[in-house]
Image (cartoon, rainbow, N blue to C red):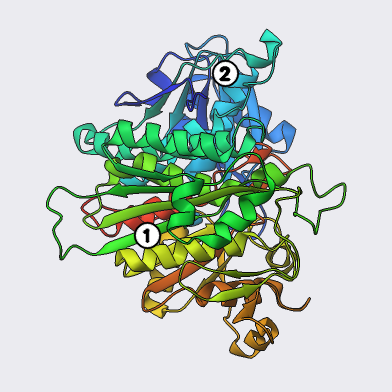
Amino acid sequence: MCFDVPMNVALDTSPAPDLQAALVTVLAFSGEGDKATLELGPEAAALDAKLAGRIAAIAAEEGMNGEPGKTLLVHTPELGTKRVLLVGVGKASELTALELRKVAAVTAEEAEKRHLASAVLALPATLDAAAAVRYAVEGAILGNYRYTKWLTDDNDTKRYLEALHLSLPGADHASLAPVAARAESAARAVAMARDLVNAPPVEVTPRRLAEVAQEIAAENQLECIIYDEHKIAAEKMNLLLAVGGGSAEQPRFIHLTYRPKDADASTPQVALVGKGLTYDAGGYNIKPTGALEDMKIDMAGAAAVLGAMKAIRAFGPKVIVHGIVPSAENLVSHNAYKPGDIIRSHNGKTVEIMNTDAEGRLILADALSYAEKLGCTKIVDLATLTGACMIALGPYTAGLFANDEAWKKAVLDAAQRSGEDFWAMPLTKKLKSMLKSPIADMKNIGERWGGAITAALFLQEFIGKAHWVHLDIAGPASNDKPEPGVPRGGTGFGVLTLLELLAAEGPAASTEA
């Protein structure tokens, strides 16, 4: 499996009008008044002046008013730049660097669609240079992402865009090079996570996830431990073992570790835990037709964790980071676990199985208690856990549950800087009674109401003193409607937030949106 985007992103000190490229993107603003009117940015105005106002005239004819998301392509054969792409970004006073991620993605997508080898994006000098470069690099790479492995027609697989130049005259490119490198590492990690989610379940199995983890460890000098089904049983991770029991593909437990150079016994430890259901048929509570076809995405939490571990060296956090992935397939067979079973978890608590399709919380439970035993004082888990969270928040927003306000705020702040959307949800104690069982310590599912909350309350039973955040990413883990930088399919959601969170624990300076 090849985790790559075949394109280079380069910084350039030359003004955009002077660069030779098949396409140059410049910003178009809306006027500051109540009525949207077009205002060309400085770079767009410079090109327009070379063309005696033709860009502005065509924009007026086409009704281009600089509203966010609006685009206009103008052919300029008399210039070295053969095409000018105007991208609307709204009012100049409201422009943030984060918006450049979408602009760069649109540039890459437009160039690829027109079979162009090169493109230029003019970055505005009004924004912080480091932030502008960071988000533009991320957007360029993510906008160029395609999953084409299983396509056989050359017309569908051929890639055209070779280089996207970021024009930023007068900037200190030596100081911006590390920023660009970190952004590229992060974006390529997102691309890897997308590949894992998009790949068919016949390819991405628990064993394959373990192999990917080993490849990541070798590339990034990480420690790697893989438990097979025998070691999982020896470690008494019986919930993971039960969920995977119905498949001929045996479960795997993945543990990657990053250690900073000066780590010692006093170095704080953080755990990233990702749900790795490489396929979820629901077990004996089998899903209906219509709900089965996309269940390869049920390992998106694992993909996010592996993506973050792939890029972690570029961010250099000062803490020890554990990337933990419990992985299994949830199928039906004579060995599958059944409703009514009682299973003893890794931390000794017993669980009555009321629904075999509530399996993600089971494998996470064993992984969370494992992370606690490692001595991790901070834990984040990511999981496509409940449809209830998607019903509550829609397809683009993930739910966030936490047992500690400071850690919750750190994750939310990191998410805001990364441009990923989370919403804080309550851990309503009153709902915990839904999980009571007369014959075991708890049931694995509550009643219909508050399903995302009861799932989080279940997970909390496997957290001791650690500061913990649970991220239910069921909605934004995949995308049905393509948007700039996010094609249909796996999104790699969560990778950027995790890396931004870890960056706050280390020397790599974060950039504000």
Where residue 503 appears, as percent x and y from the top left, is: 30, 54
Query: Residue 199 lies in what quarter of the image?
Result: top right
Residue, x 85% and y 47% (percent of image)? 290
Where residue 260 appears, as percent x and y from the top left, is: 19, 50
Please give the residue where the numbered disc 1 appears in the rendered image: 271
**What secondary structure is found at the residue carrying circle 1?**
strand
Taking depth in this image into account, of 179 and 19 the one nearest to the observer is 179
Query: Residue 35 lies in what quarter of the image?
Result: bottom right
- Residue 41 in view, yes or no: no
Please give the residue where the numbered disc 2 appears in the rendered image: 83
Task: Give the alpha-carbon distance from disc 1 to disc 2, as whole Å.
Answer: 48 Å
- Residue 197 in view, yes or no: yes
Q: Are marks 1 and 2 in contact (CB under 8 Å)?
A: no
Q: Using the image, determine if residue 141 lies above or below residue 345.
A: above
Where residue 20 appears, as percent x and y from the top left, is: 43, 13
Residue, x 82% and y 53% (percent of image)? 287
Inspect the image, locate mark 2, and give the three-letter code of the amino acid beneath it: Arg
Inspect the image, locate mark 1, and give the three-letter code of the amino acid beneath it: Ala
Q: Nearer the viewer, mark 1 or mark 2?
A: 1
Taking depth in this image into account, of 473 and 160 the one nearest to the observer is 473
Residue, x 72% and y 67% (percent of image)? 388
Give the mark nearest the N terminus, 1 or 2.
Answer: 2
